[in-house]
Image (cartoon, rainbow, N blue to C red):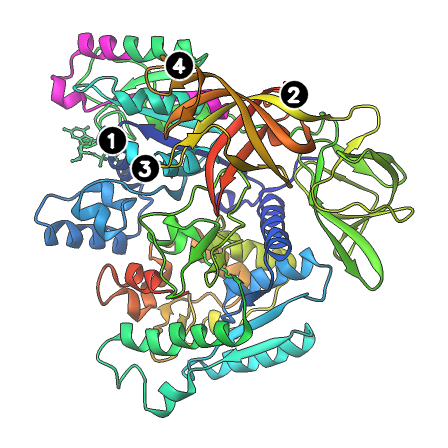
Amino acid sequence: MGAVDSQTRQLKFVIVGHVDHGKSTLIGRLLYDTDSLPPSKMEEIRTASAQLGHDVEFSYVMDNLEEERSQRVTIDTAQIQFRTPQSEYVIIDAPGHRQFIRNMVTGASEAEAAVFIVDAAGGVREQTRRHAYVLAMLGIEQVIVVINKMDLVGWSQERFQQVSGELTSFLGQLGITPLLVIPASAKLGDNVAKPSTNMPWCTGAILIDSLAQLRRRRRPQQLPLRLPIQDRYELDGKKILLGRIDTGTIRTGEEVLFLPSGVKAEVASIEVFLQDRTGAEAGESIGLTLRGDEPIGRGEVACPTDAPAAVSGRFRASVFWLSNDAFRMGEQLKLRCATQQVPCTIERIERLTDSSTLELIAQDARQMAATQVGHVVIRTERPIAVEPFAQTPELGRFVLTRGHDAAAGGIITETKG
Amino acid sequence: MPLSKLDELESRSIFIVREAYQQFRKIALLWSIGKDSTALLWICRKAFFGPLPFNVVHIDTGYKFPQMYEFRDEYAVKWDLDLIVGKNTEALEAGMGPEASASKLDCCTALKTEALKQTIGREGFDALLLGIRRDEHGIRAKERVVSPRDRQFKWDYQNQPAELWDHYKNSYAEGTHARVHPMLHWTELDIWTYTRRERIPVSPLYFARDGKRYRSIGCHTCCQPVDSTASNVDEIIEELATTTEAERAGRAQDKESIYTMQKLRAMGYM
Ligand SMILES: Nc1nc2c(ncn2[C@@H]2O[C@H](COP(=O)(O)OP(=O)(O)O)[C@@H](O)[C@H]2O)c(=O)[nH]1
């Protein structure tokens, strides 16, 4: 019963790369060659390909929207599960087109690892570099590189080394060292799920085997408790705080500190439906009652009294602007960090950089446009609980919203401005 | 002890359900009586320690299997649900049905989408919880956890909002509503292993009789059973580990045109 063992956990990886470099084809090939597709899905893909008058397109496995198929471009991110005898994976397909960067970031924000694809003929391109930047910013350190379309360059080892060298050095600038660089042809299937016979010079692992090297992100039990409160819920006169534990553990009888308010209270009970609990750990969604009637609600973060998060109303961050409407200095935004939400302004854009070339666009910039990255000082209307992203991702990352929509994502680099 | 996969799936779903309840004015759970939305209902009960603080809506086309109505009525009482049944009586009285209409699309639109629109309009819900999963259909793989729908119910799938980490869209223009998908990251197999672990009741239609069972249940007019000998949850789990047939293979509306599902969803189908 190994395959259905509910204890096996899934590893989520995102496939990124410049538009047309073969992301969707690679996923289709991976699923096809491992018999992961139902016959009816293959039939549907054949029919759809025939209707549009071309050869069987593996990219249709993920590109399901009619517009995606007729325009032959991935518009939105999609996810699909896939299993090897050893492990279960969730593949996140991320669109490579600049226009759809918002969808790419959405897809990548859920991933624990990435497969980075580069066209051997086309080489490193604008979105290749931008996607590398996004991975670095999101803290995705495990990266496997696939140099695709080797068939188009006559399976040349020299070309492989050239492209691989160029990408590896760019990734190096961002602090990413790929686990592996694999020459492949997604279209023909070489080195995806089957070893290639066209590249005798290549002796390394093929893609499917290399996935086994990816590690799941650890659930940080050993870190201090961080429990953002989602809601204060009343049931039969009992006031229950609802939330999911991001890091650490919690026990009844323990005194916890709520931030940003600074209120201390003893945990009277841990509430899990139909269970008797005296403790809970990172990853669990629980309820909590307190001794005394402290006015704690959404937006507070429970911490240990001796290892609190920082409380700050002014901090440094890197912000990736996503909205097509540029940010203008002086604008009011809303900041969402864990379950906290607070009006904020960007006080300074100390440096504005291009997320693809990494070049400095301006110092002390007044505007920030889509795909630009600002190294900024943010001031919130009132202090909130924060931490550097590198220390506690859940309290170190945030979304900036404008009007009804998310306009940017960011990570906190320093909790004091 | 690290959480098991099912624990993690459940915890994330509870988190999403609680976010929805907190962030919207008036939410409801759309219960199709199928296994997925029943698992979601179960998770909602766990999220709020038993009694649900919101309505449960069943959109009744009038063509559901009798066993589904029985199941609904039994558990509505057992779980003390605030059940609302939404029905497009006007269309039904005018004779709408899968035989009467030119295409399945028209029938689904009138009896499901329209009925849902009427119910939302009447009750003033601003968000609906739905049990859809990414692995059900290629189009569903593109869904966000929280997805806005405009006044006309349109799903603007070419222009979906960014959804970073666990920050779901929580602000909407007047007149729009949101679809919330707490089970999006589950698979069919996950649902069944969870159903087994939690001993969640499911309709007997899922279990094989005379060599056939339903993998997906909806209107009796448009669902075909698949060949199967799986007569209990354990056997269904065994079967799914080896089958290569798609889950919705028995669903008529998926077959008409490859993009019917996309069109239905764009118009607000659940
Ligand atoms: N010759 C060749 N063409 C490929 C290969 N992989 C993908 N393609 C083609 O490149 C085009 C773009 O591929 P697609 O997967 O849609 O790229 P995406 O935009 O990165 O998802 C399609 O026409 C594919 O058939 C390959 O290994 N060799």
Which residue is more in the foreground, A53 or A103? A103
Image quarter of residue B97: bottom left
Query: Taking the image as drawn, is residue A211 in sight?
Result: no
The answer to which of marks 1 and 4 sits earlier in the sequence is 1
* Identity, as a three-letter code, of the amino acid under mark 3: Phe
Span of residues in magenta: A136-164
* Identity, as a three-letter code, of the amino acid under mark 1: Val
The image shows residue A373, relative to residue B247, as above or below, that is: above
Residue in the image at 54% along x and 70% along y: B124
Query: Taking the image as drawn, is residue A318 in sight?
Result: yes
Q: Are marks 2 and 4 on the same chain?
A: yes
Residue B252 placement (x, y as % from top left): 29, 70
Disc 4 target residue: A362
Mark identifier at residue A19: 1
Disc 3 target residue: A100
Q: Residue A140 magenta-drawn?
A: yes
User: Would you say the beta carbon of the disc 1 residue lies within 8 angstroms of ligand 1?
Assistant: yes
The image shows residue A161, relative to residue A57, as above or below, that is: above
- The 10 Å Cα crowd at callout 1, few under 14, some 14 to 19, many 20 or more, is many
Q: Are marks 1 and 4 on the same chain?
A: yes
Please identify, in this view, whether the residue under mark 2 or under mark 4 is nearer the observer: 4
Count of numbered tags: 4
**Distance from the alpha carbon under mark 2 to that under mark 4:** 24 Å
Disc 2 target residue: A415
